Image (cartoon, grey):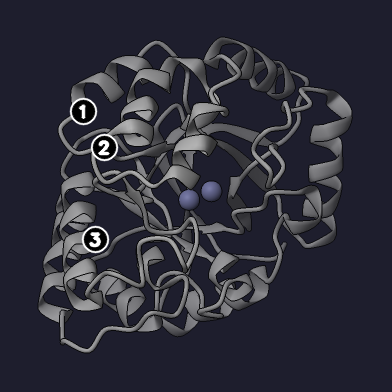
Amino acid sequence: MIIDYHIHLERDTHFEKCPYTIENIEAYLEVAEKRGIHEIGITEHCNRFAEFFPLMKELADGEGAYPETSEWLRNICTETLEEYITYLSKMKELGYPIKIGIEVEYIVGREEELKKILEPYPWDYILGSVHFLGNWSIDFSKDIGWPERDIDSTYREYINTLKNAAESEIFDVLAHIDLIKKFGYRLKADLSGLWLDCLDSIASEDLAIEVSTAGLRKAVKEIYPSKELLLGCKERNIPITFASDAHDASEVGLDIGEAINMAGECGYTEICTFQGRKKDLREISLL
Ligand SMILES: [Zn+2]
Ligand SMILES: [Zn+2]
C-alpha cells in the first residue's frame, strides 16, 4: 500500500477559501491514482480555522513577531473546524479513500488549549508541526529572521522544541521533522546527540514520523528527514507515513518514488496508516 498523508486543499496564498466540493476531492484523487497512491490524508493547517485564532493571534502579535507573518496570521483563520469535518466525513461516507487529518502547530505552553480545541472531532490522525520558534516562523522566508540569527543555536532550539512537541501527547505523527533545513542554512556544530535524544522521545511516545518529499521542492532539495535521521528512526522502530505536503492537486504524491526508495534503503518494509487515531501497519507495495 502507498499513502500520501500530508495534503492541503488550500492554495499557497492561504487567503482563498477552501473549495469543499466533490470535484475538488476527485481532482486530488485522480492525481493520487496516477501516481500509484491508494489513500490520501487531508491535513489542513490549523491556522485556517477560527477556533485557533486566539492562539494564532499571539503568534502574530507577540514579542519578536515579524510584520510579514503578523499580517498573514491575522487574515487566515476564516473557516471553522465544523465545516471542514462535515465535508471530509461526507467524502469518507461516499467511499472516497481519504483520511481526516489536520496539521497543528505545536505552541509551547499552550498544549492543553490545543488538546481542548481538537478533542471534539473524529480525527483519523493529528499531524504535529514546528514552524515557529517563539513568535518567529522558521519557514516563512529565508530573509525573515534567519540573517540575524546564529544557525547552530537556532537548530538547537528547534530540536528541543520538536522533542517537547513529541512529548506533548497532542499528536499521532510528526511532520517534516527536519524542516529547519528548508532554506539550506546548515549546521556547523555536531548536534547528532541532541537529535538522537529527540528520536528517543518520538519512539517512547509511540509517534510516527513522515517521509516527506516537500523538501525536494525547497532550497535544500532534500527529503525530510535526512537519511541519517531516518536510519535513526528505523533503529528505534518509529513507524513512517509518506507525505507530499501538496498545496495543489498537481502536487499529490509528487516524487513519492524517492520517498519509497529512501524508506527501503533505511530498511522500512511497512508504512503506517491510521483510522480513528489507531495505527495499522501495512506493507509498502505498489499493488
Ligand atoms: Zn508544515
Ligand atoms: Zn503542510
Mark 3 element type:
helix
Q: Left of 86 or right of it: where is 223?
A: left
Of labels 1 and 3, earlier in sequence is: 1
Q: Left of 15 or right of it: where is 236?
A: left
From the image, tell me which residue sits under label 1. 110
Mark 2 Cα within 10 Å, few/some/many (few <14, many 20+)?
many
Determine whether label 1 and label 3 are within 8 Å by CB: no
| Residue 143 visible (yes or no) | yes
Of labels 3 and 2, earlier in sequence is: 2
Determine whether label 2 and label 1 are within 8 Å by CB: yes
| Residue 102 visible (yes or no) | no
Q: Using the numbered discs, state the Cα–Cα distance from disc 3 to disc 2 in whole angstroms.
A: 12 Å
Image quarter of the C terminus: bottom right
- Residue 99 on image: x %, y %: 59, 34
Question: Looking at the image, is 115 positioned above or below residue 9?
Answer: above
Q: Amino acid at mark 1?
A: Arg
- Residue 115 on image: x %, y %: 28, 22
Which residue occupies 69% across, 17% down? 87
Q: Amino acid at mark 3?
A: Tyr
Determine whether label 3 and label 2 are within 8 Å by CB: no
- Residue 173 on image: x %, y %: 37, 47
Which residue occupies 76% across, 61% down? 36
Which residue occupies 85% across, 25% down? 22
Q: Using the numbered discs, state the Cα–Cα distance from disc 2 to disc 1 in whole angstroms.
A: 6 Å
Considering depth in this image, is 272 or 177 the residue closer to the camera? 177
- Residue 148 on image: x %, y %: 29, 70
Which residue occupies 22% across, 89% down? 188
From the image, tell me which residue sits under label 2. 107
**Label 2 beta carbon less than 8 Å to ligand 1:** no
Considering depth in this image, is 104 or 260 the residue closer to the camera? 104
Mark 2 element type:
loop
Q: Using the numbered discs, state the Cα–Cα distance from disc 1 to disc 3 in whole angstroms.
A: 17 Å
